[in-house]
Image: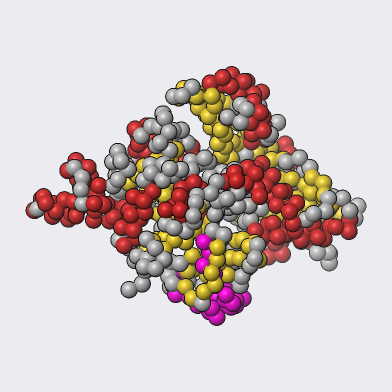
């Protein structure tokens, strides 16, 4: 009988203790001799220079643990530890694809934060079960009740506390009070009937109900302890074994043999693609990326800093290879040539922060561009392009911290000097909610030749989508000219800002009286381009992302922080007084106005203010820029 795989994805807000928990798990299972510390660079998962310098995770990490021991494992645990900062949410989203469930950490001292709720929502939308771990219960002031109340609001049902005062899980030992065990079976009619027939079966039925209810997302168990001290960690591992043995069989599509979830530039192996195999796989197998066939030349089992080359893998296993480098996180691995675009299970990443880069010496331009391309390959949340007007390189990302770390990584690979602009927030033009009737026409050669008139309506799409719709039959060259002109203008706008929310409905076309032998399509394209450029500036607003933020601060800094937020036109939603002399500020502001605020807060609160910031940008959540 093969050993089952269980892939817990670890999710939490910053400083909840994810990496500390993984270090303790590695220690308790004998994988390392002592738990490491992020700030010392001694952890197994957070070892990049940027992670050590800032004390945060910036990449997802796989830790493979044969449990309870490598000699006679009953389950293979493949933990995926994810970054807590929202700038790196794309990595957490990709990891979600290969996680069997979410192991969500909650800091019992600080309680639930906005990102905790976001993690819960993302897991529920993807249909993943959730196991909660209340961390830092060893600290004075730790609170169990408040997080449980908040979780009930987030989940829409009451979570079930499984651990006792000593950290043990009675149901795993066949113990527990009736009041503790009954909630584990009451959700299931068959289990409840068995209990009514024989009350002595309750401990056994409760464990069955826990496992089954967990996988069906009918039960949300809550464990507790201290990752730093190791309290409750072994009990959690015992529960994970029970969950693994009761995990339902996979129902993956026959077309899907695997899914990519991470790219990495390994210090010894070079470029790697991490993926989960959904069916048995071996070296020498072929996969199609579109119509291109790729052969797997090697396979590696990766566990934090360690790796082992293998010749094959089993369904559910997390592996890596140097062979499938065309795949990006979210893309499906298929053995069949579908002759269509590769399926990507992730939503596009909107990169709203930008910085301009250029080398000090022209002869270094190509090398700098190559290193930027490597950076974009490594991180799907990064994109690079060249501004046609200036030749400068533009690096785009998901946040200030994301771009700062991207620049730090660039300096490691490109040691020559280069110049950068300040970080800017992307600006867009949004068509106002109105309908504008237009007639586009262009003449050439002293008005001897006319494009004819394109009759159309310009109106809001009531979202960020844009496009052209034809309510009249036109020749293909004319339709292509109109569509091409619309696409060109809305992609770059008037001053480089993409135009959003504009729908053009073509109602008719009046051809010129004399067409001669001139190509009308080129004149029509010019007419539409000029017409749109004339009308868009007066009928659109400049917009940008909106940031929702939470700040946890000691009381003595509250006034200064509120004053600083007011200067940035922030809207204060709520200020809550907490225990231990702290306040929680909830606010929103234009992301553009918050540039540099994290550094200001760090200085103002002497490093004791904790900022959690979520950047939103959609039709219902954006800021109007003036």
Q: Is residue 191 visible?
A: yes
Left or right, 475 with reference to 198: right
- Front residue of 577 and 78: 78
- Front residue of 382 and 601: 601
Q: Residue furthest front?
A: 33
Position of 134 relative to 1 (above/below): above
Residue 2 highlighted magenta (yes or no): no
Q: Is residue 488 visible?
A: no
Region rendered in magenta:
278-303
Residue shown at 44% from the left, 24% from the top: 579
Indicate the position of residue 293 as horizontal and vertical percent values: 60, 77
Q: Quadrant of the C terminus?
A: top right
Residue shown at 55% from the left, 36% from the top: 612
Residue shown at 14% from the left, 53% from the top: 201
Q: Quadrant of the N terminus?
A: bottom left
Residue shown at 72% from the left, 48% from the top: 407
Indicate the position of residue 140 as horizontal and vertical percent values: 41, 30
């Amino acid at each position: 009988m093969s050993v089952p795989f269980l892939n817990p994805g670890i999710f939490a807000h910053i400083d909840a203790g994810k990496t500390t928990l993984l270090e303790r798990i590695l220690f308790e299972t004998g994988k390392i001799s002592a738990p490491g510390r992020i700030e010392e660079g001694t952890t197994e998962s957070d070892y990049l220079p940027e992670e050590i310098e800032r004390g945060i995770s910036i990449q997802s990490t796989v830790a493979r643990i044969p449990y309870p021991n490598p000699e006679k494992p009953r389950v293979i645990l493949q933990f995926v530890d994810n970054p807590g900062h929202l700038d790196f949410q794309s990595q957490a989203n990709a990891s979600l694809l290969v996680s069997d469930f979410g192991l969500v950490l909650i800091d019992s001292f600080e309680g639930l934060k906005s990102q905790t709720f976001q993690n819960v929502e993302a897991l529920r939308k993807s249909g993943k079960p959730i196991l909660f771990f209340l961390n830092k219960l060893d600290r004075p002031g730790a609170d169990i009740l408040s997080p449980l109340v908040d979780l009930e609001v987030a989940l829409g049902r009451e979570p079930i506390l499984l651990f006792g005062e000593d950290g043990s899980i009675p149901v795993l030992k066949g113990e527990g009070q009736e009041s503790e065990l009954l909630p584990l079976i009451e959700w299931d009619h068959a289990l409840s009937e068995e209990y009514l027939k024989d009350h002595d079966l309750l401990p056994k039925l409760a464990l069955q109900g826990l496992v089954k209810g967990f996988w069906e997302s009918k039960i949300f168990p809550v464990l507790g302890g201290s990752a730093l001290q190791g309290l409750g960690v072994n009990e959690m591992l015992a529960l994970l074994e029970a969950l693994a043995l009761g995990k339902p069989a996979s129902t993956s599509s026959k077309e899907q043999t695997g899914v990519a979830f991470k790219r990495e530039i390994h210090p010894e192996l070079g470029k790697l693609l991490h993926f989960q195999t959904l069916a048995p796989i071996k070296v020498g197998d072929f996969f199609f990326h579109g119509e291109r066939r790729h052969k797997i030349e090697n396979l590696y089992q990766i566990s934090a800093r360690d790796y082992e080359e293998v010749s094959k893998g089993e369904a559910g296993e997390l592996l890596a290879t140097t062979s499938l480098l065309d795949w990006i996180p979210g893309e499906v691995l298929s053995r069949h040539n579908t002759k269509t675009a590769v399926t990507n299970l992730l939503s596009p990443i909107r990169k709203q922060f930008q910085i301009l880069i250029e080398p000090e010496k022209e002869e270094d331009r190509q090398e700098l561009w190559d290193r930027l391309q490597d950076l974009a390959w490594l991180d799907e949340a990064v994109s690079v392009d060249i501004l046609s007007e200036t030749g400068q390189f533009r690096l785009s990302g998901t946040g200030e911290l994301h771009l700062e770390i991207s620049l730090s990584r660039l300096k490691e690979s490109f040691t020559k000097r280069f110049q950068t602009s300040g970080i800017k927030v992307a600006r867009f033009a949004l068509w106002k909610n109105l309908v504008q009737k237009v007639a586009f026409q262009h003449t050439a050669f002293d008005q001897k030749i006319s494009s004819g008139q394109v009759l159309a309506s310009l109106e809001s799409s009531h979202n960020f989508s844009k496009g052209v719709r034809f309510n009249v039959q036109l020749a293909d060259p004319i339709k292509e000219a109109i569509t091409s002109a619309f696409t060109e203008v809305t992609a770059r706008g008037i001053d480089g800002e993409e135009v959003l929310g504009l729908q053009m409905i073509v109602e008719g076309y009046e051809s010129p009286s004399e067409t001669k032998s001139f190509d009308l399509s080129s004149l029509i394209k010019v007419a539409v381009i000029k017409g749109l450029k004339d009308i868009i500036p007066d009928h659109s607003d400049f917009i940008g992302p909106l940031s929702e933020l939470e700040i946890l601060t000691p009381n003595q800094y509250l006034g200064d922080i509120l004053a600083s937020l007011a200067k940035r036109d922030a809207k204060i939603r709520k200020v809550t007084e907490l225990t231990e002399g702290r306040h929680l500020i909830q606010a929103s502001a234009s992301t553009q106005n918050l540039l540099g605020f994290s550094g200001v807060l760090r200085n103002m609160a002497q490093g004791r203010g904790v900022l959690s910031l979520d950047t939103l940008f959609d039709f219902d959540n954006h800021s109007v820029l003036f």
